[in-house]
Image: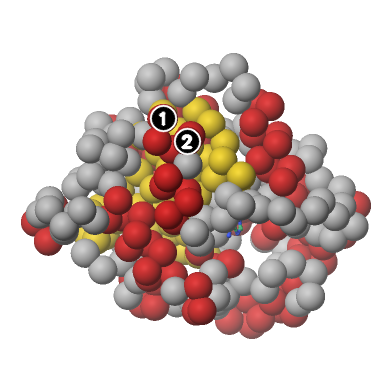
Amino acid sequence: MITRSLDLDRPSDARVHDYFLGGGSNFAADRALARRVLSAAPDARIETLAHRACLGRMMRTCLDLGVRQFLDLGSGIPTAGSPHEIAAEADPAARVVHVDNDQIAATQGQLVLARCDNAAVLHADVRDPDSVLAAEQTRRLLDFQQPVAVLMFGVLHTFGEHHDPAQVIRRYTEAVAPGSFLALSHFTGEFAPERAREVLRVLDGSCPRPALRDRETVRSFLDGLDLVDPGAVPAADWRPGPADADLRSPEPLGFALLARTTPATRSRPDGASA
Ligand SMILES: C[S@@+](CC[C@H](N)C(=O)[O-])C[C@H]1O[C@@H](n2cnc3c(N)ncnc32)[C@H](O)[C@@H]1O
């Protein structure tokens, strides 16, 4: 359970992200930090848009493959093009559970989805998979006997090593049916180390400090999952469409990947073979 109180004088990851996406749910402290990030990395806004567009392409890939359920971990403040909108566009019966530990993201999401039967927002910490998986919203909307796409866009880098990212991912991917997907994006210094260090420097003390990880490290967290082509690449390079050319940055600060659970090698959490 989350009991943190709301402090609008302290920037939040969710509200800075909202500012970069052009949303209206951000405050002076968030905008001040966003401007500092832009001074360190002028393409930060373009990159945020590239990641959001990539998330949409990965979701549509899953939808094309028949997936109709999404567990959106670290969902952010709902803005245009949120996962529940992308899912509903493809199939009004598709179901989405958004999870965020930011109070504004959760409250705003609950308001937006108040009259929606197929999507819900859970105010929870995604590093606690057991409580996310057992939550009423998750049990009501998601059928774990059918494939689910677990979305972890822009959230895994908030996990320190002591949070055991591999174990958290395993808990989610073992809970879902064989043939499910994991879509994630992660902050990295692999492509532009100086720029990434500059971003860390301006973030220092303002927000939880993100972890810089390379693709090999993140791939090592994905035991039993197969990467979908083209693998782990800058978000703008993941199966881009014509509209994505403008979102390409010469110094990417992140990568994205889509992976699929492999039925033959999986075992279910109840001990039965998948
Ligand atoms: C960079 S935003 C990404 C939003 C969205 N996934 C996207 O890619 O457009 C990261 C979100 O993760 C949330 N977040 C960070 N750590 C979290 C945690 N431990 N549990 C739940 N949400 C978390 C933040 O509040 C924020 O809304």
Q: Find numbered disc 2 in the image and state the secondary structure of the residue it sits on.
A: helix
Kind of residue sitting beneath label 1: Arg
Kind of residue sitting beneath label 2: Glu
Determine the residue positioned at 44% across, 74% down. Answer: 164
Asked if the residues shown at circle 1 and circle 2 are in contact, with their CB atoms under 8 angstroms apart, the answer is: yes
Is 34 on the left or on the right of 234, as rendered? right
Is 189 on the left or on the right of 231, as rendered? right
Distance CA(mark 1)–CA(mark 2): 6 Å
Few, some or many C-alpha atoms within 10 Å of disc 2 (few <14, some 14-19, many ≥20)? few
Q: Is residue 130 above or below residue 92?
A: below
Residue 86 percent across, percent down from the top left: 47, 30
Residue 29 percent across, percent down from the top left: 88, 57
Few, some or many C-alpha atoms within 10 Å of disc 1 (few <14, some 14-19, many ≥20)? few
Determine the residue positioned at 85% across, 55% down. Answer: 7
- Residue toward you, 4 or 229: 4
Residue 269 percent across, percent down from the top left: 24, 56
Determine the residue positioned at 33% across, 30% down. Answer: 68
Residue carrying label 2? 136
Q: Find numbered disc 1 in the image and state the secondary structure of the residue it sits on.
A: helix
Determine the residue positioned at 49% across, 19% down. Answer: 117
Residue carrying label 1? 140
**Residue 1 seen in the current view:** yes
Is 186 on the left or on the right of 112, as rendered? left
Q: Is residue 177 above or below residue 230?
A: above
**Residue 230 seen in the current view:** no
- Give the quarter of the image for residue 252: bottom right
